């Protein structure tokens, strides 16, 4: 019993310590999306999967570009989950070589998820943010488009920040 | 006496005139009647059928019901030239309309052209041409097309749809606008 308790504590502790270092960015200029604007997506190929009862999956492949307002998202693949009942996009999976460009910021990472109705973006793995000469590195980036809030997370205290030297 | 002969001959001429006219009317009505089948010319290869219908079945289930306002069957070529086509895929709940079509009697495939409109529960597809292959239950659009839905507008160049698997593949640069 004690051994089981010990392992449970270690497991919970490991998970809570997964992202030990966080940095919070709050402001209008950081990855600003007009989340109410229409979403335009282009790609070299598209697969439409209607085999599920509840939703369609639109699987965009090769040279995918998503444009919403002033923001552009580039990736190798993108999956759109379109709910049949509500006739709305529920989620966008952004897969491989992700690059997000807004007016003042460029962000790159390996993968991401965009929950369109909630206005939330979750980017993961090798996150790099370049904004006004500053560069930030982390393992995950959570973006709240509605409240203009972004949280950069890193494992093992590994959020690196580079500020350009002042003249 | 002469007067009576003249009047009688006049009536005979009038009667003859009207009877000839009636004959012409009857023969032209025969050409326009909606009988089942009638050779267009002495050549029996061509058969015209109004309100023609074809249906494809597989394993006892109807996979396609194809109706046309008019069809000309060419027996030697084993094709039917169709006008104002409506094709219904009951299992997939898809209906396709087109102004023209060709139905292949041997293979049971179909080529639809001119103002092709594909209507499903959630989308409408507009194109100039569409081919249906019965054996593989496949639909192919090889020309620029548009797909419209409640929240989506899509433009593509080529579409291949596998009705059984409920999957559609679009190749060539595709552009989509989602209204969200």
Image (tube, coloured by chain):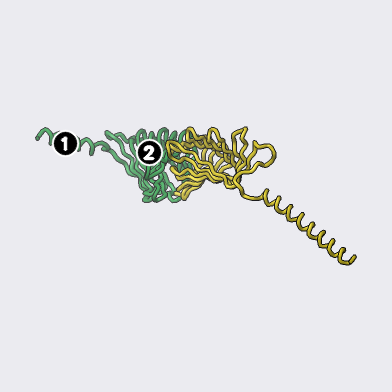
Give the image quarter of residue A128.
top left
**Which shade of the palette goes to chain B?**
yellow
Provide residue A34's location: percent of width, then percent of height.
44, 49
- Is any atom of residue A133 visible in this view? no
Q: Nearer the viewer, residue B63 or A62?
A: B63
Q: Nearer the viewer, residue A57 or B16?
A: B16
Provide residue B86's location: percent of width, then percent of height.
54, 46
- In the picture of the structure, the residue carrying the numbered disc 2 is A112
Q: CA–CA distance between discs 2 and 1? A: 30 Å
Question: Disc number at residue A8?
Answer: 1
Q: In terms of secondary structure, where does tag 2 sit?
A: strand
Give the image quarter of residue A135.
top left
**Which shade of the palette goes to chain A?**
green
Q: Nearer the viewer, residue A135 or A65?
A: A65
- Whether A28 is drawn above or below A159: the answer is below
- Crowd class of label 2 (few under 14; some 14 to 19; many from 20; radius 10 Å): many
Residue beneath the point at 55% across and 33% down: B106
């Amino acid at each position: 019993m004690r051994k089981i308790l010990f392992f449970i504590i270690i497991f919970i502790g490991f998970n809570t310590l997964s992202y030990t270092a966080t940095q919070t960015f709050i402001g209008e200029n950081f990855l600003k999306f007009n989340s109410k604007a229409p979403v335009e997506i282009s790609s070299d190929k598209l697969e439409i999967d209607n085999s599920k009862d509840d939703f369609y999956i639109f699987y965009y492949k090769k040279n995918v570009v998503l444009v919403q307002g002033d923001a552009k998202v580039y990736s190798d693949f993108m999956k759109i989950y379109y709910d049949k009942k509500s006739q709305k996009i529920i989620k966008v999976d952004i897969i491989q070589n992700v690059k997000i460009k807004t007016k003042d910021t460029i962000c790159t990472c390996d993968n991401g998820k965009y929950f369109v109705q909630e206005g939330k973006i979750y980017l993961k793995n090798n996150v790099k943010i370049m904004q006004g000469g500053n560069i930030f590195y982390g393992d995950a980036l959570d973006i709240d488009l509605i409240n203009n809030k972004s949280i950069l997370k890193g494992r093992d205290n590994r959020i690196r920040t580079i500020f350009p030297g002042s003249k | 006496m002469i007067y009576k002969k003249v009047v009688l001959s006049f009536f005979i001429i009038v009667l003859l005139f009207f009877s000839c006219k009636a004959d012409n009317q009857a023969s032209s009505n025969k050409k326009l009647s909606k009988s089942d089948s009638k050779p267009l010319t002495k050549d029996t290869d061509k058969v015209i059928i109004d309100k023609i219908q074809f249906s494809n079945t597989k394993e006892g289930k109807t996979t396609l019901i194809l109706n046309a306002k008019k069809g000309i069957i060419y027996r030697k070529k084993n094709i039917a030239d169709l006008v104002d086509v409506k094709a219904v895929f009951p299992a997939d709940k898809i209906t396709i309309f087109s102004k023209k079509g060709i139905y292949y009697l041997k293979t049971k495939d179909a080529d639809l052209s001119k103002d092709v409109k594909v209507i499903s529960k959630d989308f409408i597809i507009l194109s100039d041409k569409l081919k249906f292959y019965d054996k593989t239950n496949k639909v192919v659009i090889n020309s620029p097309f548009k797909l419209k839905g409640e929240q989506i507008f899509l433009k593509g160049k080529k579409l291949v749809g596998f009705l059984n698997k409920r999957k559609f593949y679009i190749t060539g640069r595709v552009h989509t606008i989602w209204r969200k």
